[in-house]
C-alpha cells in the first residue's frame, strides 16, 4: 500500500468556456470498466479524463456518462488516417501529434531508432516536438552514411572526475557526453550511490603511478565536442504512473528534483498522474508489453513454457538489509550460518495456466498483454528469479523447483503434485487462499510449511500454513498499538457511513473517544477540539469519504496545533485525500500517518535490487515483482540458519526490500504475519517509517 505519493498542491479551475472549446465525446461506462481501460481505449491519459470528470476519482458505476477529450488523438485511426503525407514511393512525411514519442512513432512505422534519427538529424538536439515534420524512411532502407573522423592512433588518454557535493550521475554524464550506463560500467562502485570525493574514471585506464600524464576535461573546454559528439544525451517521453512523486521520479532517473523540474517546468505545479515528462534515455527502455518482465533474455513464450526450470542468469548480488531495532523487536539480518551444508528444497507453485495459454488462438503475446492474472504471475516469477539468482551468488545449498499450479479461484492441480512436494522444506504458493489451504492440508502429515504469498483473506487454522500478508485487522491493530506505545490521546472522527470502522474501534480499541457529529452528519468542530489534550500527542483517526468533513477536520487540527500536538491518522486508503480539493501541504503539516504492509526505502540494498531488476527486465519492479523477491529470498534465507522454517518463523523477524516478516502463531492455529510499517509524511515531503 504505497499510498499518497502524488502531490496535489495546485487546484485546477475548469470554466464552462474551457469545456466548449475542447473537443469531447460522451461515453457510457460499462459494468466493471476502469478509468485506465477507458483511457487506453481512447488513447488519452487517466488525468485527461479526471480533468473533465472530477467525480470519476471517487469511482465509476455502470451507465455513468463521461466526457472524453479527443484532441489528443482520435480512436481507432489507422496509420493512413494520421497527418502523414506520402511524398514518394519510399519516404513518408509524418506530422508529430500530441503525446507521440520516439518509440510510438518508430513502432507505428516499424523502423529503428537509428533510422529515424539518421533521416532527421535535428532530433538529436530537439527531441520529438508537436507539429514537427519528420521524414519516415522506407522499411529496410539503410541509414545515410555519416562520415566519421579517423581515430587517432596511440594510447587513449586517462580522464578522471572527482565527485563534488550535490553532483549527480546524470549531470556528470552529460558534462562528458556519455550516458549514465557508460559511467556506471566504467565505475561499478557507484551503481548504488555516488560518494562525494570519489574519483570517477571518465576515459582511458587509470594509471598505476602518479607519474602518468593525466588530463581533466572541464565543462567549458568540452563545449564544442558536446555539440558534435554522437553520445550526446538524448531524451524520451515518460508518462507518470499512479502514486509516483517527484522524489520517486528523481530516484528512478538518477536526477536531482531541481534537474528534473528544469527539464519539465510543469513539475513546479506538482506531479500529476498521466503527465508526460521529458527524461534522459537509458533508464527505462520502452516496452510494448508491460507483462514481459520475465527473467533474463528469454522471450515471453520461452519464459512461461518451462516453469519447472530455474536456470537463472548471470551474477546479481542483492545485499541484505541491515539489522535494526524496532520497538523491542529485533529485525534479524539473515546470513548463511557456518557449517550448514545440508541441501534444502524450495518449491514454487505459480499459476501459469500453460494449457490455457497454449490453446489461446490469439497468441502468447496477446494473452500476456490482456490477462491481468498472468501479468501478476509473471511479475511475481521475475522477482522470484532475482531471489534465486541471489541465492546462487551467495552459494546457498538450496534446490528450487517451479511447477504450474493451474489455478482458478476454486481449483488447482496441487493434488497431482503431492508426491513432488512432500520432501520439500518449504512450499511457496498457490496464490488463491482456498488452494493454499488445500495444499497445506495435503502436506500437513509431512510437516511441510506452505507460505501463502499474496492472499489477504483470513486463513483457516491449519498448523503448517503461513499467511505472509497481514490481515486487515492486524494492520489496523498495529496503528493503535503504536499510538498507545507513545502514550497518545486517541480521538476518532468517523462518519455514520463507516459502520464497520465504528464497530471495529468500539469492540477492539477501548478508550478511544469519538468526536460528535451534527444532526446533518457533519463534524462538531467544537467537540473535537474539546477532546484534544495539551501536553500529549493527540492522534486523530479520520475515516470519512465526505470532502466537507475532511476539510473541517483538517482545519480544526491545524487551528489546534497552536496549543496542542496533533497528528492526523487514517486506517485505510482514502481517495478523497487524493483530490485537488485537499491541500497536500496541509497533510504534511499534520504529518499524515497510516499503516502499510510495504515501505519506501533508499537503503543501499533496496537501490541495488531496483537497479539490477531494471537491468535484467528493462522495466521498474512492480509490487508483485518485489513481493516475489521478498517472499522467495526470505524463505530461502530462513532455511540456511541451521533450523527449519517453523523454528525461524517463531524466533526471527526479518525485513527485505519492501516487506517485513514477523510471523506469529494464531490462537486458533496456523501462522500469520504482523509485519506492518507505520508510515508518515515528514516536513521534507518524504515518507518515513515511524515504528
Image (cartoon, rainbow, N blue to C red):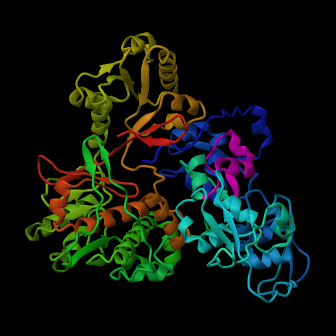
Of 54 and 417, which appears nearest the observer?
Answer: 417
Instruction: Give coordinates of residue 554: x percent, y percent.
Output: 50, 23
Instruction: Give coordinates of residue 4: x percent, y percent.
Output: 50, 41
Note whether 319 is above or below 469 in the view shown: below
Of 597 and 371, which appears nearest the observer?
Answer: 597
- Report the span colored magenta: 253-279
Q: Residue furthest bottom?
A: 153
Q: Residue furthest left?
A: 445
Which quadrant would the C terminus be assigned to in this image? top left
Is residue 517 among what the camera can see?
yes
Q: Residue furthest front?
A: 211
Q: Residue shown at 65%/50% (left/top)?
A: 166
Instruction: Give coordinates of residue 467: x percent, y percent.
Output: 24, 55
Is residue 361 among what the camera can see?
no
Note whether 346 is above or below 141 in the view shown: above
Number of marks in the rendered image? 0
Q: Is residue 158 left or right of residue 514?
A: right
The part of the image, by quadrant, that contains residue 478 is: top left
Q: Residue shown at 11%/48% (left/top)?
A: 668
Of 629 and 651, which appears nearest the observer?
Answer: 651
The part of the image, by quadrant, that contains residue 531 is: top left
Is residue 169 magenta-colored? no
Q: Residue shown at 45%/54% (left/top)?
A: 603
Instruction: Give coordinates of residue 14: x percent, y percent.
Output: 72, 34
Note whether 359 is above or below 50 in the view shown: below
Q: Residue shown at 23%/60% (left/top)?
A: 434
Note whether 261 is above or below 543 in the view shown: below
Amino acid at each position: 500500500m504505497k499510498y499518497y505519493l502524488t502531490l496535489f498542491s495546485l487546484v485546477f479551475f475548469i470554466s464552462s468556456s474551457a469545456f466548449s472549446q475542447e473537443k469531447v465525446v460522451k461515453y457510457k461506462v460499462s459494468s466493471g470498466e476502469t478509468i485506465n481501460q477507458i483511457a487506453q481505449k481512447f488513447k488519452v491519459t487517466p488525468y485527461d479524463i479526471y480533468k473533465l470528470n472530477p467525480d470519476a476519482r471517487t469511482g465509476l458505476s455502470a451507465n455513468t456518462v463521461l466526457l472524453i477529450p479527443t484532441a489528443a488523438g482520435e480512436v481507432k485511426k489507422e496509420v493512413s488516417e494520421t497527418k502523414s503525407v506520402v511524398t514518394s514511393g519510399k519516404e513518408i512525411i509524418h506530422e508529430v501529434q500530441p503525446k507521440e514519442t520516439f518509440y510510438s512513432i518508430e513502432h507505428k512505422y516499424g523502423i529503428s531508432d537509428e533510422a529515424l534519427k539518421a533521416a532527421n538529424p535535428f532530433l538529436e538536439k530537439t527531441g520529438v516536438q508537436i507539429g514537427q515534420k519528420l521524414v519516415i524512411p522506407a522499411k529496410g532502407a539503410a541509414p545515410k552514411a555519416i562520415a566519421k573522423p579517423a581515430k587517432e592512433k596511440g594510447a587513449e588518454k586517462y580522464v578522471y572526475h572527482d565527485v563534488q557535493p550535490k553532483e549527480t550521475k546524470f549531470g556528470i554524464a552529460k558534462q562528458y557526453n556519455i550516458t549514465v550506463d557508460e559511467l556506471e560500467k566504467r565505475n561499478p562502485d557507484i551503481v548504488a550511490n555516488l560518494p562525494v570525493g570519489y574519483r570517477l574514471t571518465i576515459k582511458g585506464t587509470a594509471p598505476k603511478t602518479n607519474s602518468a600524464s593525466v588530463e581533466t576535461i572541464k565543462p567549458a573546454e568540452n563545449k564544442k565536442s558536446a555539440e558534435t559528439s554522437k553520445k550526446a544525451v538524448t531524451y524520451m517521453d515518460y508518462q507518470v504512473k499512479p502514486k509516483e512523486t517527484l522524489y520517486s521520479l528523481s530516484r528512478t532517473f538518477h536526477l536531482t528534483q531541481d534537474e528534473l523540474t528544469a527539464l519539465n517546468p510543469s513539475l513546479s505545479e506538482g506531479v500529476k498522474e498521466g503527465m508526460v515528462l521529458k527524461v534522459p534515455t537509458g533508464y527505462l527502455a520502452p516496452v510494448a508489453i508491460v507483462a514481459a518482465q520475465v527473467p533474463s533474455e528469454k522471450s515471453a513464450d520461452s519464459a512461461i513454457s518451462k516453469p519447472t526450470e530455474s536456470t537463472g542468469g548471470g551474477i546479481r548480488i542483492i545485499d541484505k538489509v541491515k539489522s535494526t531495532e524496532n520497538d523491542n523487536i529485533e529485525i534479524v539480518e539473515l546470513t548463511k550460518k557456518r557449517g550448514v551444508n545440508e541441501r534444502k528444497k524450495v518449491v514454487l507453485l505459480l499459476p501459469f495456466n500453460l494449457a490455457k495459454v497454449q490453446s489461446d488462438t490469439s497468441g502468447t503475446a496477446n494473452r500476456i498483454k490482456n490477462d491481468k492474472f498472468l501479468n501478476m504471475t509473471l511479475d511475481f516469477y521475475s522477482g522470484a528469479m532475482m531471489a534465486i539468482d541471489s541465492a546462487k551468488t551467495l552459494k546457498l545449498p538450496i534446490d528450487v523447483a517451479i511447477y504450474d499450479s493451474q489455478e482458478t479461484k476454486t481449483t488447482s492441480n496441487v493434488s497431482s503434485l503431492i508426491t513432488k512436494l512432500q520432501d520439500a522444506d518449504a512450499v511457496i504458493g498457490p496464490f488463491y487462499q482456498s488452494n493454499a489451504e488445500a495444499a497445506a492440508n495435503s502436506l500437513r502429515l509431512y510437516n511441510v510449511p506452505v507460505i501463502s504469498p499474496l492472499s489477504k483473506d483470513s486463513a483457516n487454522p491449519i498448523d503448517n500454513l503461513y499467511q505472509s500478508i497481514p490481515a486487515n485487522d492486524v494492520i489496523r491493530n498495529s496503528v493503535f498499538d503504536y499510538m498507545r506505545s507513545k502514550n497518545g490521546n486517541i480521538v476518532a472522527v468517523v462518519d455514520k457511513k463507516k459502520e464497520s470502522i465504528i464497530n471495529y474501534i468500539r469492540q477492539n480499541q477501548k478508550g478511544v473517544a469519538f468526536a460528535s457529529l451534527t444532526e446533518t452528519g457533519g463534524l462538531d468542530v467544537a467537540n473535537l477540539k474539546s477532546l484534544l489534550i495539551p501536553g500529549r500527542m493527540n492522534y486523530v483517526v479520520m475515516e470519512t469519504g465526505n470532502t466537507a468533513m475532511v476539510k473541517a477536520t483538517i482545519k480544526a487540527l491545524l487551528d489546534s496545533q497552536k496549543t496542542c500536538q496533533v497528528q492526523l491518522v487514517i486506517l485505510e486508503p482514502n481517495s478523497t485525500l487524493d483530490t485537488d480539493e485537499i491541500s497536500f501541504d496541509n497533510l504534511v503539516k499534520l504529518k499524515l500517518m497510516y499503516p502499510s504492509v510495504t515501505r519506501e526505502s533508499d537503503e543501499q540494498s533496496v537501490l541495488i535490487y531496483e537497479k539490477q531488476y531494471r537491468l535484467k527486465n528493462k522495466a521498474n519492479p512492480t509490487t508483485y515483482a518485489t513481493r516475489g523477491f521478498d517472499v522467495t529470498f526470505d524463505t530461502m534465507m530462513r532455511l540456511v540458519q541451521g533450523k527449519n522454517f517453523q523454528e525461524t518463523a517463531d524466533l526471527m523477524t526479518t525485513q527485505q526490500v519492501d516487506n517485513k516478516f514477523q510471523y506469529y502463531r494464531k490462537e486458533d492455529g496456523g501462522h500469520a504475519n504482523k509485519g506492518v510499517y507505520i508510515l508518515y509524511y515528514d516536513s521534507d515531503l518524504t515518507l518515513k517509517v515511524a515504528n
